[in-house]
Image: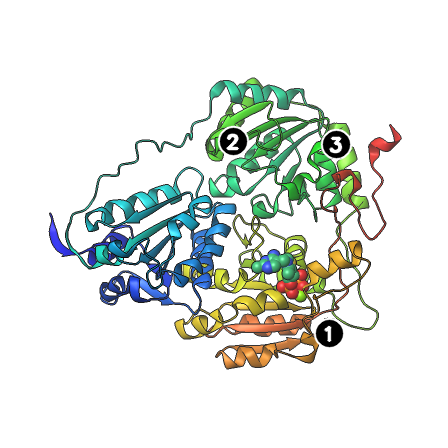
Amino acid sequence: MTERMTGAQSLVRALEHMDVDTVFGIPGGAILPAYDPLYDSTKVRHVLVRHEQGAGHAAEGYAQATGRVGVCMATSGPGATNLVTPIADAYMDSVPIVAITGQVASAAIGTDAFQEADISGITMPITKHNFLITDPADIPRTIMEAFHIASTGRPGPVLVDISKDALQAETTFSWPPVMQLPGYRPVTRPHSKQIREAAKLIAEARRPVLYVGGGVHKAGASAELLELAELTGIPVVTTLMARGTFPDSHPQHMGMPGMHGSVSAVGALQQSDLIVGLGVRFDDRVTGQLSSFAPRAKIVHADIDPAEISKNRHADVPIVGDCKEVITDLVSTIRASGEHGDYTDWWTALNGYKATYPLGYDTWEDGSLAPQYVMERLGAIAGPEAYYVAGVGQHQMWASQFIGYEKPGTFINSGGLGTMGFAVPAAMGAKMGRPDATVWAIDGDGCFQMTNQELATCAIEGVPVKIAVINNGNLGMVRQWQTLFYDERYSNTNLQTTRRIPDFVKLAEAYGCVGLRCERPEDVDATIEKAMEINDVPVVIDFVVHQDAMVWPMVAAGTSNDDIKIARDMAPKWENEDD
Ligand SMILES: Cc1ncc(C[n+]2csc(CCOP(=O)(O)OP(=O)(O)O)c2C)c(N)n1
Ligand SMILES: [Mg+2]
C-alpha cells in the first residue's frame, strides 16, 4: 500500500520498519524536518546527547553490545563534522552504524551555504558506503540499503546525508522497497579446497597458533572457536578486539598479543611455524616490525574482507569467508580426517613462558594505589557478566590485561583508531542496548575530560552506567613514551588533576550522578561494592592512582616482537636462544 507523506515522515517510517528502537542525536536547521515526525514516533526513542561525537560513540556502544545496527543523527555542517571521529572509529573497528545527517537544500549544495559541509565527501574514505539523497522517493530504499550494507559482510559505518528539501517535499511511501545493490555480494562461504589446505597445514605443524581477532565475535563464532581449539589442542591468542571471544581462564589461552601483550602470546606468535589468523588484520600493534614478525610461520588467513588478506603479511592459504562458516568447516574437515598434530614440545615451551612471565605490576611503598590492582578488583567484583568499556591510554591496556574476560563481546574499546573520549558515550550506548547488564566504563582522566558531558544525558535519560576514572593526573600513555623514549622530558602531559581541577566527584554531582573517591588500596573493594549497589543513577569513581605506573610488557613501536620488554631494560629469555 502506498501512502502520501513528507520525506521526513518516510524517513521515520523506514527507521520504524527497520526495527530501530534508539537513535542518538542533536537537531539543527537542516535535519529539523526529520525531528518533527520523530516527536510522534512510539517505536523510535531519540536520545538527545550533548555532543554529536557522543551520539556516534553511543551508536557504536549500542551496536557492539547488541550485535544490531547503531543509529545516530545530526544536522548539516558542524553537526555532521562532529560525527567524523566516531565514523572513523567505527570504520577501523568494523562496527555497524548508520549515521543520518541533514544537508542544506539541494539548490544550495556547493554554494558555501550556511552550515554546509560536504559530509559525504569528507567521510568517503572512512565509511563502508555513503549516500547523498536529494529526491524524497529514494529515502526508504536508501535506508534499507544502508542498514543492509552496515550489517552484512564486514560490518562498518554507512552515512546517509539527506537534503532539507528532500525531507520537506511530499512523496509516496511503500514498504518494503526493493534494494538496488547489484555490485554488493559479500562472500561468506569459504572455498572447500582452501579449508582442506588449512587442515593439512594444521596436522603437519609442530608449533601452531590460533590468532583470533574481532572478526570471530562479529561472526558469532566463539563457540565454534572453542570447539576448534579443543579439538586440535592449539594455543589461542586474542587481540584487543577479541578479548573474551575465548575464555581467559582456559588453559589453552596465551593472552593478548602485541605492543602490550603477554610474553606467552607474543612468544607464541614469534616462534610459531603456523599462524591461523581468524578475523584479524595483522595490525602493526600486533606484528611489531613487520619484517621480523613470526619469521618461520606459514600463514592461514581467514577473513570476510578479501582486501585484508595478504595486505600486511603474505597468506600461504587465503580463505575468504565468514569466520563462523570457516571455523565450522575446519572442525568438520579435521574431525573427518582423524589426523592430529603433535604439539607436545610446543606446549612445554609455552607453559614455561606462561609460568615464568605472568602479567604483574609494581605496588607502591607510599601506600598509593596501583591502577592494575583497581582492574583486578573491578573484574573480581563486577564479574564476567558485566560489560567493560574502556577509553584510550594506559588504563585501556590495564583493563585489557587485568580484568579477566570470559564472555564474548564483554570488552568494548576503541582499538583501531584509539579514540580518547570513547568510553563514556559508548558505555551509555551499551547500557541502553543491554539495560539489564552492569556496564562499567574504565576511563582515563584525560579521556574523561573529552566526553564526560554525556553524563548529563545518562542522568536525564535514566542510564545508570558506572564510570571508573583511573586518575593518574597525566596523559599517562604519552608520558610513558616520554619516560622511555624522550629522556623523561614531560612536555605537555601533566593535566594537573592533583589540584582537583576539575574535581571529578563534584563534577559527577553537578551532572546528577553519584561521585565517589578512592585513593588507597584498602578502600578499593568497599568503593566498588558501593557503586555496584547504586542502580538508579550513574556513578563515577575517582580512583586516584600513582602517576608512575607503567604498562608492561611493551614492544617499542617499530621494533621486533623479539625485543619485547617485561620491565624497563628487562627482556624475557627465549627458549630457542639455547638451540
Ligand atoms: C583524540 C585523541 N587525542 C590524542 C590521543 C593521543 N593519546 C593516546 S593515549 C593519550 C593519553 C590518555 O590519557 P588518559 O585518558 O589520562 O589515560 P592514561 O594513559 O593516563 O591512562 C593520548 C593523549 C588520542 N589517542 N586520541
Ligand atoms: Mg591519565
2 and 3 marks in contact (CB < 8 Å): no
Is residue 180 rendered to the left or right of residue 333? left
Q: Residue at x 57, y 81 (%)?
A: 506
Amino acid of disc 3: Gln
Amino acid of disc 1: Arg
Vertical side of 349 occupied by 133: above or below: below
Of helix, strand and loop, which one carries label 2? helix
Q: Return the residue nearer the eye: 375 or 229.
A: 375
Quadrant of the image occupied by residue 463: bottom left
Is residue 253 rendered to the left or right of residue 130? right
Question: Which one is in front in this view, the residue at disc 1 or the one at disc 3?
Answer: 3
Tell me the CA gap for discs 2 and 1. 46 Å
Exactly how many numbered labels are in the figure? 3
Looking at the rendered image, the quarter that the C terminus falls into is: top right
Between disc 2 and disc 1, whose residue precedes?
Answer: 2
Vertical side of 122 occupied by 31: above or below: below
Which residue, given by chain and number where applicable, does mark 1 sit on? 520
Of helix, strand and loop, which one carries label 3? helix
Quadrant of the image occupied by residue 23: bottom left
Residue 294's disc is none
Q: Label 2 neighbourhood size at 10 Å, few (<14), some (14-19), many (20+)? A: many
Residue 271's disc is 3
Q: Return the residue nearer the eye: 307 or 336.
A: 307
Q: Return the residue nearer the eye: 220 or 506.
A: 506
Question: Which one is in front in this view, the residue at disc 2 or the one at disc 3?
Answer: 3
Residue 327's disc is 2
Q: Residue at x 51, y 43 (%)?
A: 217
